[in-house]
Image (cartoon, helix red, strand yellow):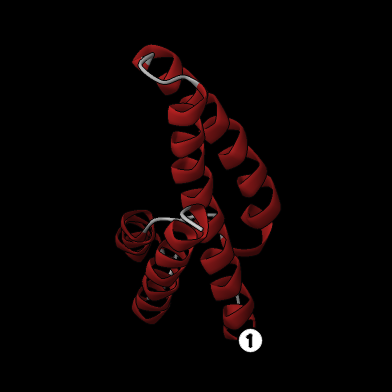
Amino acid sequence: MTQADLPRRLVAELLGTGLLVAVVVGSGIAAQNLSPGQTGLQLLQNSLTTVFGLGVLILLFGPVSGAHFNPVVSAADWLLGRRAGTGLSGRETLAYSGAQVVGAVLGALLANV
């Protein structure tokens, strides 16, 4: 990946992380409202929604940024890629992590609106 497309990748990570958090938190809130007192059903509803939501987000943003959506995944990509000369650079890892944290906060706010 070239440096020229870093802003586009950061936007993809911010949006992807934000939407993933919104899906996970939002589906948890919806499951509590739809199935009060039925914890097993709530967990099933939340996990199925999360699986399909994550699948869609990976298909959408994977070709753009790699669909990390998590600072630990980005750090692992940097750490493991150092030996092979692949993966993110240190600067890109920090930028990805910042975008992911901002996206997560915005996603949580969106889910609670």
Question: How many labels were placed on the picture?
Answer: 1
Residue in front for this viewpoint, 45 or 12: 45
Please name the residue shown 59% across and 73% down the image: 11
Please name the residue shown 51% across and 51% down the image: 22
Please name the residue shown 40% across and 60% down the image: 84
Residue in front for this viewpoint, 44 or 30: 30
**Coordinates of residue 112 in the picture (x, y in percent):** 46, 54
**Coordinates of residue 89 in the picture (x, y in percent):** 40, 75
59 relative position to 21: left or right? right
Tell me if mark 1 has few (under 14), some (14-19) or many (20+) residues whose alpha carbon lies within 10 angstroms of its own. Answer: few
**Coordinates of residue 113 in the picture (x, y in percent):** 51, 58
> Which element carries disc 1, helix, strand or loop?
helix
Quadrant for the N terminus, please. bottom right
35 relative position to 83: left or right? right
- Check the image and report above or below for 69 versus 51: below
Circle 1 sits on which residue? 4
Residue farthest to the bottom, as pictured: 4
Question: Splitting the image into 4 quarters, where does residue 81 fall?
Answer: bottom left
Please name the residue shown 45% across and 62% down the image: 109
Residue in front for this viewpoint, 99 or 63: 99
Residue in front for this viewpoint, 10 or 93: 10
The kind of residue on which mark 1 rests is: Ala
41 relative position to 94: left or right? right
**Coordinates of residue 23 in the picture (x, y in percent):** 53, 44
- Check the image and report above or below for 10 versus 43: below
- Check the image and report above or below for 53 versus 101: above
